[in-house]
Image: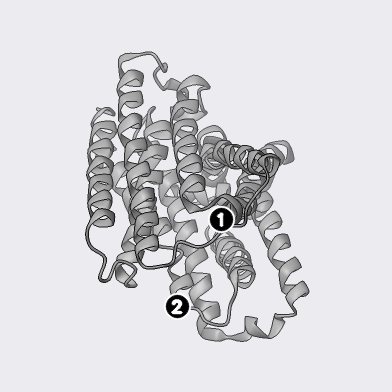
Amino acid sequence: MVLLGILLIFIGGFSAGTSPWPMKTIKQFRLPEMIFISQFLGMFIIPWVIFFCICSVPMAYNIIGIRNILFANVFSLLFGICNILSLYCLANIGFVFTSVMCGTISLICGTLIPLIFKGSGVFKDAPDIFSIKGIIIIFALVILMIAIVFITLANHSKDKLLGKAGVYGHLTKKQNTFYILLCVLCGFMSPTLLLLNTYYGNIFKEAGISAGCPPELCSFGLWTFGMFGCIFINTLYAVYFIIKGKTFKTLFNIKELLACICSGAQYILYLVLFGFGSVMMGPLGGSVGNAIGQCVCTGGQQFVGFIFGEWKGVKGKPVKLLVLGLIFLFIGIIVISLNIY
């Protein structure tokens, strides 16, 4: 069961990591159009259609209760705000600093918080942070953070070599401090979507089963009722820029529209597999599952880069940094996975 849970999170993490692939193929859609389609159709409409088909939604709603739905959406809203703010950090203080800072803080928080504040269901029995298993997790986290740093530096070095590093505006000291603090804030908010599963997953899953949902699909309740906050804020952001840019007509490009729907569906697949797989991993699923999911996402992003030729002709330092990062990533995942047994 534990091994199958890890495998499901691996598959889901890879699905999420490769979900931005439409950005490499679309020509008419800008970022706002891609966000709107992937969020509204891929992450909202499709899950709700499936949820209506597999169980009694009104019954599930009555069992869960409006209070739990509202609190769950606070988690997803924070994740949605993080998505938007991180774009401004990328634009103003660059890819390297934003990726390293957000990635490491998110990894630390998402992995350690379930050990400090116990989750619901099976996650309430997670070991303490200073237990033997907790200390091993901290050790594995150090390895994984090193991996993130190496992979981020490898991509920056590659872009610089290819003349794509980008030029960021000169900021005043106050502006620079502001965006650094904003980046730190994003790091803390980034794991909230997966923590939603840790603290509210059991409530939504039990409600789904009681409403007739098959056990293997019961996490759909969490990713439908609990995703309003994230989808609302991201869709609102996208619609604002679509209206401002008057780019409504581009939304009727069927090929690019389908690609963006696929992107959103891939991320929902990750969330569903994560919800199911983390429970199968037992008490440590909320902590270790989070770490594995985030790290496999990082690996999936590199895969997209290779497939679409980002690394074509690149040699020397960027490749060495990437290989080192992937080695540390692999070792860290092995160490933290074995700690479950």
Which residue is under mark 1?
55
Is 169 situated above or below 274?
below
Percent position (x, y) of residue 134? 36, 20
Among numbered discs 2 and 1, the one appearing first in the sequence:
2
- Viewer-nearest residue: 268 or 234: 234
* Count of labels in the image: 2
Residue 90, above or below 145: below
Locate residue 285, reporting x and y percent: 39, 34
Corner quadrant of residue 275: top left
Task: Please state which of the two labelled residues, at mark 2 or mark 1, is closer to the viewer.
Answer: 2
* Residue kind at label 2, given as amino acid type: Thr
Q: Is residue 262 left or right of residue 234?
A: left
Alpha carbon separation for disc pair 2 and 1: 36 Å
Residue at 58% across, 37% down:
184
Find disc 2 in the rendering and name its residue: 25
In the depicted structure, whether residue 59 falls above or below residue 28: above
Q: What number is the disc on residue 87? A: none
**The N terminus sits in image quarter:** top left
In percent of width and height, residue 75 lies at: 63, 40
The foreground one among 160 and 19 is 160
Say which residue appears at 26% left-offset and 27% top-offset: 339
Q: Is residue 1 visible?
A: no
Instruction: Identify the residue shown where x is 32% and y is 49%.
Output: 10
Q: Secondary structure at mark 1?
A: loop
The foreground one among 141 and 255 is 141
Image coordinates for residue 206, horizontal then vertical, percent: 53, 39
**Quadrant of the rendered image containing residue 29:** bottom right
Q: Report the residue at 77% width, 73% height from top.
A: 244
- Name the foreground residue: 233 vs 40: 233
